[in-house]
Image (cartoon, rainbow, N blue to C red):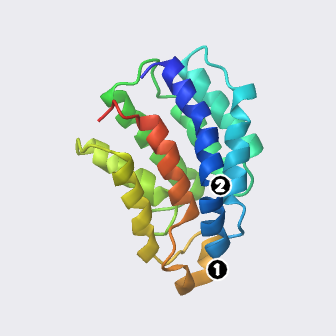
């Protein structure tokens, strides 16, 4: 995938988050503070005026800076920091090997910034399982990523705002896990397996 295509995929996330704003807000209202949908849409809406597509690294870095500045709550620093970190490993043409490196860096950045591990009902549950699937040469489709998010329903939250709900958080998909599905789907693309 080249810079032009990746830029379009990132810009298209504005449409995705516009369509999914209510879904994310409803999830966040159940086990959070109800602003995840609005925040994600605001962040990706800001990209068109802020990103530099002179190289893939610049595209990722400026995406990260825009997300940090425009997404409220914990998600802005997490997603923003991750894109900045991914800019250090991404190549101008993403092939399968580079995709593995990018998703590994994404998972590492979320773990580092969020101080999280698997099975704590966070976005990390999706990105780390995606990293593992790519390492194992498994095909990642939207459906597979969605299943990773759906699997967070059975986890009791121990991190973030959802942790306040304790056992009452069980039965809901984590909002960050759900937004991670949309972002990873854009990064991975249909043509990369």
Mark with earlier residue (1, 2): 2
Rendered residue at 67%/58% (across/down)? 36
Q: Quadrant of residue 96?
A: top left
Few, some or many C-alpha atoms within 10 Å of disc 1 (few <14, some 14-19, many ≥20)? some
Rendered residue at 76%/41% (across/down)? 69
Q: Is residue 108 visible?
A: no
Q: Nearer the viewer, residue 53 or 116?
A: 53
Indicate the secondary structure of the residue bearing disc 1: helix
Indicate the secondary structure of the residue bearing disc 2: helix
21 relative to 45, above or below:
below
As drawn, the residue found furthest toward the left would be 137
Numbered circles on residues, count: 2
As drawn, the residue found furthest toward the bottom would be 167
Provide the residue designation for mark 2.
Answer: 21
Q: Nearer the viewer, residue 127 or 172?
A: 172
In percent of width and height, residue 127 lies at 44, 51
In percent of width and height, residue 132 lies at 31, 49
Tell me the quarter of the image containing the N terminus: top left
Left or right: 125 as drawn, with respect to 58: left
Q: CA distance from mark 1 to mark 2?
A: 23 Å
Rendered residue at 55%/36% (across/down)? 85
Rendered residue at 52%/34% (across/down)? 86
170 relative to 43, above or below:
below
In percent of width and height, residue 79 lies at 60, 46
Provide the residue designation for mark 1.
Answer: 164
Tell me the quarter of the image containing the C terminus: top left
């Amino acid at each position: 995938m080249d810079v032009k295509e990746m830029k379009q995929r990132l810009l298209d996330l504005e449409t995705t988050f516009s369509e999914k704003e209510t879904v994310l807000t409803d999830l966040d209202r159940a086990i959070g503070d109800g602003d995840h949908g609005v925040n994600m849409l605001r962040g990706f809406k800001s990209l068109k005026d802020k990103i530099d597509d002179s190289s893939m690294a610049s595209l990722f870095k400026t995406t990260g800076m825009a997300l940090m500045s425009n997404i409220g709550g914990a998600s802005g620093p997490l997603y923003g920091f991750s894109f900045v970190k991914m800019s250090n490993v991404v190549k101008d043409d993403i092939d399968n090997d580079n995709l593995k490196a990018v998703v590994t860096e994404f998972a590492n950045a979320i773990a580092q910034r969020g101080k999280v591990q698997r099975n704590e009902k966070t976005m990390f549950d999706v990105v780390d399982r995606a990293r593992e699937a790519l390492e194992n040469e498994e095909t990642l489709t939207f459906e597979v990523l969605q299943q990773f998010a759906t699997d967070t329903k059975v986890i009791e939250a121990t991190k973030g705002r959802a942790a306040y709900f304790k056992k009452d958080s069980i039965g809901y998909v984590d909002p960050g896990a759900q937004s991670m599905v949309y972002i990873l789907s854009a990064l991975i693309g249909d043509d990369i397996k």
